[in-house]
């Protein structure tokens, strides 16, 4: 038994949630916030049998796409007005942890 913790962008969470339902994968969905961009994320916690881990990872990879976004960085310059320009960054994808589970109970 494994515990998969997958952190995805909110934009990808509905597609991933639907993929889990179609594949009969039970997941707990939590609303979370990323530290770097302070943007919304969704964290899925999945308890799964060892032989289905690769299947679940494939679902996560397929539903979580990387894409480019533009942000305007904040400027902290005292007494000066400085013009800032948007910077392209890569967002999306998924951060996934696969952990061993010693015991699992479903009551």
Image (tube, grey):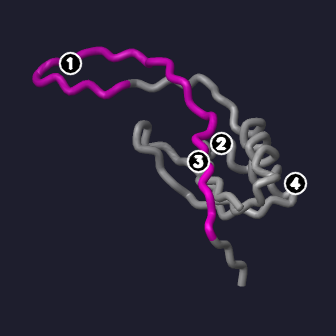
**Residue sitting at x 47%, y 50%:** 33
Q: Residue furthest right?
A: 22
Q: Quadrant of the N terminus?
A: bottom right
Dot 2: within a 10 Å radius of its alpha carbon, few (fewer than 14), some, or many (20 or more) residues? some
Mark 4 and mark 1 in contact? Answer it, CB < 8 Å: no
Chain-order first, disc 4 or disc 3? 4
Q: Earlier in the sequence, mark 4 or mark 1?
A: 4
Q: Secondary structure at mark 4?
A: loop
Q: In the displayed structure, would residue 103 be above or below residue 107? A: above
Task: Give the number of the mark in front: 4 or 3.
Answer: 3
Q: Residues within 10 Å of mark 1 (few under 14, many from 20)?
A: few
Disc 3 crowd rating (10 Å Cα; few below 14, some 14-19, many 20+) is: few
Residue marked by disc 2: 11
Q: For marks 4 and 3, give the CA distance.
A: 20 Å
Q: Nearer the viewer, residue 70 or 28?
A: 28
Q: Is residue 39 left or right of residue 99?
A: left
Which label sits on residue 81? 1
Magenta stretch: includes residue 40: no
CA distance for labels 1 and 2? 34 Å
* For discs 2 and 3, the disc positioned in front in the rendered view: 3
In front here: 46 or 81? Answer: 46
For mark 1, give the secondary structure.
Answer: loop
Ranked by sequence position, the earlier of labels 2 and 3 is 2
Tell whether 31 sits left or right of 86: right
- Look at mark 3 in the image and give the residue it sits on: 97
Residue at the spot 62% in from the left edge and 50% down from the top edge: 98
State the residue position of label 4. 23
């Amino acid at each position: 038994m494994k515990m998969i913790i997958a952190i995805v962008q909110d934009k990808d969470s509905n597609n991933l949630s639907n993929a889990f339902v179609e594949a009969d994968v039970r997941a707990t969905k939590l609303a979370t916030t990323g530290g770097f961009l302070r943007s919304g994320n969704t964290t899925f916690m999945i308890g799964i049998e060892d032989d289905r881990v690769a299947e679940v990872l494939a679902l996560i990879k397929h539903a979580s796409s990387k894409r480019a976004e533009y942000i305007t960085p904040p400027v902290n310059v005292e007494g000066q007005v400085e013009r800032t320009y948007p910077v392209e960054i890569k967002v999306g994808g998924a951060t996934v942890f696969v952990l061993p589970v010693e015991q699992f109970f479903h009551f």
